Image: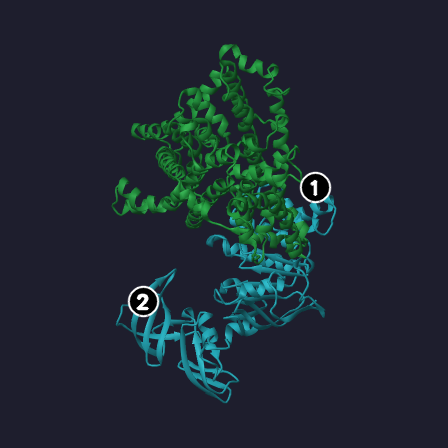
Chain colours: A green, B cyan
């Protein structure tokens, strides 16, 4: 019976993934690789022979590597002082530094553009650092906080100075976490789309934007498919590196004793020096965006209701559309994600397919959203699945993008449930359903709330896939912002800034709402 | 009112955790399974609870076959080693949980849960969060939770393991009182001699998955089945002595016994003492201090002896040793060495 339940929990999400992910992506790859009924790899070698494409691949790797190094340089000092010091406003700083992660790329692109940081490699790298400081603060910070301070005390008592202690004790313990965070950052920068499109301009192309150009503008599916394969290989490699390192990250033992109040002037200086670069990087563009959006007497906002763009739909309609789509995508993603996570973490022997299922769920992380969007267009064009003109195609695409995040945030929480709690409930006469209600449900509810906030933020900001499948009447806010930015004229810029500010507030509120903890949930998390 | 385990075997892959164990618990009886860590105690307990399947063998309650019955239908209470309290529920909800699963209505189950809390001495703790309790308080909540639905069998896994040393004796006595008062047949699993011999009517010794001895607490304490069991039960001096015609002849005089042949006479360190009137003489090899007395290891005319001493006898000193003969342990001749 347990096996049947597990199969049922997995079957729904897997069917969804098969139909809406494997099929369209497979179709794209097939078009690129299959010529006259047989697989030809010449499109792959063509990538290597074409100097232009070779340059694109090289630039993608270079900018991702550069962005990763820059991110670590800005984020590690901030993580260090946040892990070391206790001070008023610490929680607010953490929230501030981690929030950019959920912000739409379009918003960030717009913010940096309005600052004048645009059209250069620096602009791209700075924007990537902006996004990914959050990853380092979260991943490395969690490990740092979990380090046993007594190991450092032991080193100090054995005669090691602060620097030596850091290099010989602290750093080696952190290395797996730093490598794991670094590979995730590299992955995100490698597949970055909106930032490159908006800040890079025509001069800079990465594999992802090139796939977009080849498919949408040049209609060269062979090249696009070959690029998709190159990207897929790189992404799987980065995911694998991150995965092995996460495995080595030490299990976290909570210790409250680790943080000190910075009392000496030296400690305060250290705190300021560690935090300032990261804080300035986050506050300045967002603050500037907000202020500039209010320029010209706020006409950017007032025009939103009146000026139609291209079609009889106003930007305000885009806001309504985005919210509707986000609600639907969140409901589907959280439903499927919780079902999958529950099946993957059921007690008892791990099903053979569990590992494969987990990988399949994470795969959309690595496949270019652009590829997915384009795959939708070429696959879902015949009844009964003629979705090209359907409203549903957008929330479905958003679900695909959000699902890996939902599963990734939920699985560890469910896995942390002490199996003896379930056994205790069973010994007290609770059947399987009652056990689930008493032990799992409170945890699932909490995880679902966090995941929902995450999923909604992702849907609100999704840009790459949406750009392909959007129709005038389903224009979402990110697409509307992009359209405004591509047009000349101060009015269009004002409206882009206004919409970007609204979207920023919307995603921020949604993501924070999911993270808000009740007393019960705090208790669950700090369980001894 | 009798639990019977027949040839119960628990396997994890190719490892045999419990090997063809036979066990019987009668009404009102407290049975302790005693063994070193890794001997399969917890596996045995979990198999009886239904949390671990029996690879072979059968479990029955008064002739009713329980072997394939799901844990939540067995009506057994289990107190986990680290208590496994529900952290998202308060104390009262924890204690009332087993009544809720049995469909007892809210008023009755709260009244019963409050009565259980009174019994374990936690009156008024109803709305406390379980993560704010001390180790001893948690242990009592866990006990109240396990007893509240009046299980037909209560199982305790190292009940005092997570309690501070200084509170253990007091809690052990309380636990004993509560167990006696409830009259529930109880199976206790522990590696701690004090715990086992304080509570149990009957002791089952488990070694590497096999039950090596079963008997009343007194019998097991006085007549360990093998020399290995004797050592596990704290015997540090083993002397081989001749016996026959109803007596075993020890260096300190005769002791009545029905055994014949060469018998191992064992003593715990507290039952031999350095005494000027002692008939056995020897030379001190080492000496150290323990709590309120010294322990002396000496090579004597009858073999190596560990005894207590009021004074720190120097190494190399000659000592004479007296014995509390009534406390001597006898191991049957021909009992296997291991």
In the rendered view, tell whether residue B209 sits above or below residue B112.
below
| Percent position of residue A396, x then y | 62, 37
Which residue occupies the foreground of this view, A2 or B135? A2
Q: Which mark is residue A479?
A: none
Residue occupied by mark 1: A384
Which residue occupies the foreground of this view, B324 or A136? A136
In which quadrant of the rendered image does the C terminus of chain B lie?
Answer: bottom left
Q: Which mark is residue B287?
A: 2
Whether residue A500 is visible here, answered yes or no, is yes
Which residue occupies the foreground of this view, A73 or B337? A73
Whether residue B121 is visible here, answered yes or no, is no
The kind of secondary structure element at disc 1 is loop
Viewer-side label of 1, 2: 1
Report the residue that reaches farthest toward the front.
A36
Which residue occupies the foreground of this view, B118 or A261? A261
| Percent position of residue B147, x then y | 65, 55
| Percent position of residue A343, x then y | 60, 50
In three-dimensional space, the C-alpha distance between marks 1 and 2, rounded to whole angstroms, equals 90 Å
How many C-alpha atoms fall within 10 Å of the one at disc 1: few (<14), some, or many (≥20)? few
- A325 sits left or right of A68 in the view: right
| Percent position of residue A110, x then y | 47, 23
The kind of secondary structure element at disc 2 is strand
Disc 1 to disc 2: CB gap under 8 Å: no
- A368 sits left or right of A278 in the view: right
Residue, x 33% and y 64% (percent of image)? Answer: B288
- B260 sits left or right of A386 in the view: left
Can you tell which quarter of the image residue B321 is in?
A: bottom left
């Amino acid at each position: 019976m347990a096996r049947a339940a597990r199969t049922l929990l997995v079957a729904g999400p897997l069917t969804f993934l098969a139909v809406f992910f494997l099929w369209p992506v497979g179709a794209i790859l097939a078009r690129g690789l299959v010529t006259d009924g047989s697989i030809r790899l010449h499109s792959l070698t063509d990538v290597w022979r074409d100097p232009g494409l070779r340059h694109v691949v090289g630039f993608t790797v270079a900018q991702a590597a550069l962005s990763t190094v820059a991110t670590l340089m800005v984020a590690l000092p901030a993580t260090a002082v946040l892990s070391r010091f206790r001070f008023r406003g610490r929680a607010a700083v953490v929230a501030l530094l981690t929030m950019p992660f959920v912000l739409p790329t379009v918003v960030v692109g717009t913010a940096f553009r309005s600052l004048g940081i645009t059209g250069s490699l620096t602009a791209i790298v700075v924007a990537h650092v902006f996004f990914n400081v959050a990853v380092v603060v979260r991943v490395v910070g969690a490990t740092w906080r979990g380090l046993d301070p007594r190991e450092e005390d032991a080193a100090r008592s054995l005669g090691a100075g602060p620097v030596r202690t850091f290099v010989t004790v602290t750093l080696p313990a952190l290395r797996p976490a730093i490598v794991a965070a670094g590979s995730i950052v590299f992955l995100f920068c490698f597949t970055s789309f909106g930032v490159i499109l908006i800040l890079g301009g025509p001069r800079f192309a990465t594999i992802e934007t090139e796939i977009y150009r080849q498919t949408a503008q040049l209609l060269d599916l062979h090249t696009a498919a070959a690029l998709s394969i190159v990207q897929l290989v790189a992404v799987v490699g980065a995911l694998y590196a991150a995965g092995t390192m996460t495995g080595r990250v030490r299990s976290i033992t909570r210790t409250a004793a680790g943080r000190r109040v910075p009392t000496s002037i030296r400690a305060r200086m250290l705190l300021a020096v560690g935090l300032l670069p990261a804080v300035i990087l986050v506050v300045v563009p967002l603050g500037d965006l907000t202020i500039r959006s209010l320029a010209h007497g706020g006409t950017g906002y007032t025009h939103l209701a009146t000026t139609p763009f291209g079609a009889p739909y106003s930007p305000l309609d885009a806001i309504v559309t985005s919210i509707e789509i986000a609600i639907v995508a969140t409901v589907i993603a959280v439903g499927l994600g919780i079902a999958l996570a529950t099946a993957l973490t059921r007690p008892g022997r791990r099903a053979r397919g569990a590992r494969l299922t987990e990988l399949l769920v994470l795969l959309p992380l690595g496949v270019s959203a652009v590829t997915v969007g384009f795959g939708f267009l070429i696959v879902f064009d015949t009844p009964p699945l003629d979705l090209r003109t359907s409203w549903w195609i957008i929330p479905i695409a958003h679900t695909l993008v959000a699902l890996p995040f939902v599963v990734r945030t939920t699985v560890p929480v469910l896995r942390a449930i002490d199996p003896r709690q379930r056994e205790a409930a069973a010994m007290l006469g609770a059947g399987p359903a009652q056990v689930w209600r008493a032990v799992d449900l409170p945890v699932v509810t909490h995880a679902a709330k966090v995941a929902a906030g995450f999923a909604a933020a992702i849907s609100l900001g999704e840009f790459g896939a949406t750009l392909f499948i959007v129709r005038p009447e389903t224009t979402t806010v990110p697409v509307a912002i992009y359209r405004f930015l591509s047009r000349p004229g101060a009015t269009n810029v004002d409206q882009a800034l206004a919409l970007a500010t609204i979207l920023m507030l919307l995603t921020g509120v949604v993501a924070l709402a999911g993270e808000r903890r009740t007393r019960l949930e705090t208790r669950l998390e700090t369980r001894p | 009112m009798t639990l019977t385990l027949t040839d119960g075997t628990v396997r994890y892959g190719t490892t045999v955790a419990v090997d063809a164990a036979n066990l019987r618990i009668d009404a009102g009886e407290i049975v302790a399974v005693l063994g070193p860590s890794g001997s399969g105690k917890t596996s045995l307990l979990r198999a009886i609870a239904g949390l671990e399947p029996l690879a072979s063998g059968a479990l029955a309650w008064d002739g009713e076959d329980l072997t394939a019955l799901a844990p939540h239908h067995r009506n057994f209470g289990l107190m986990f080693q680290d208590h496994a309290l529900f952290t998202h529920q308060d104390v009262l909800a924890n204690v009332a949980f087993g009544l809720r699963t049995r469909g007892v209505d809210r008023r009755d189950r709260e009244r019963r849960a409050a009565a259980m809390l009174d019994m374990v001495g936690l009156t008024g703790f109803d709305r406390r969060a379980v993560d704010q309790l001390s180790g001893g308080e948690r242990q009592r909540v866990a006990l109240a939770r396990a007893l509240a639905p009046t299980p037909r069998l209560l199982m305790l896994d190292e009940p005092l393991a997570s309690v501070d040393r200084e509170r253990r004796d007091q809690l052990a006595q309380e636990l004993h009182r509560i167990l006696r008062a409830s009259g529930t047949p109880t199976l206790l699993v522990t590696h701690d001699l004090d715990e086992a011999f304080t509570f149990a009517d009957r002791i089952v010794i488990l070694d590497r998955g096999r039950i090596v001895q079963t008997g009343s607490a007194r019998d097991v304490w006085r007549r360990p089945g093998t020399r290995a069991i004797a050592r596990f039960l704290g015997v540090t001096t083993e002397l081989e002595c001749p016996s026959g015609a109803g007596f075993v002849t020890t260096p300190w005089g005769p002791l009545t016994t029905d055994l014949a042949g060469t018998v191992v006479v064992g003593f715990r360190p507290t039952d031999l003492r350095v005494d000027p009137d002692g008939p056995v003489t020897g030379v001190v090899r080492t000496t150290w201090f323990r709590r309120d007395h010294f322990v002396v290891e000496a090579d004597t005319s009858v073999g190596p002896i560990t005894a207590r001493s009021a004074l720190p006898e120097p190494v190399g000193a000659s000592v004479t040793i007296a014995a509390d003969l009534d406390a001597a342990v006898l191991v049957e001749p021909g009992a296997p060495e291991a």
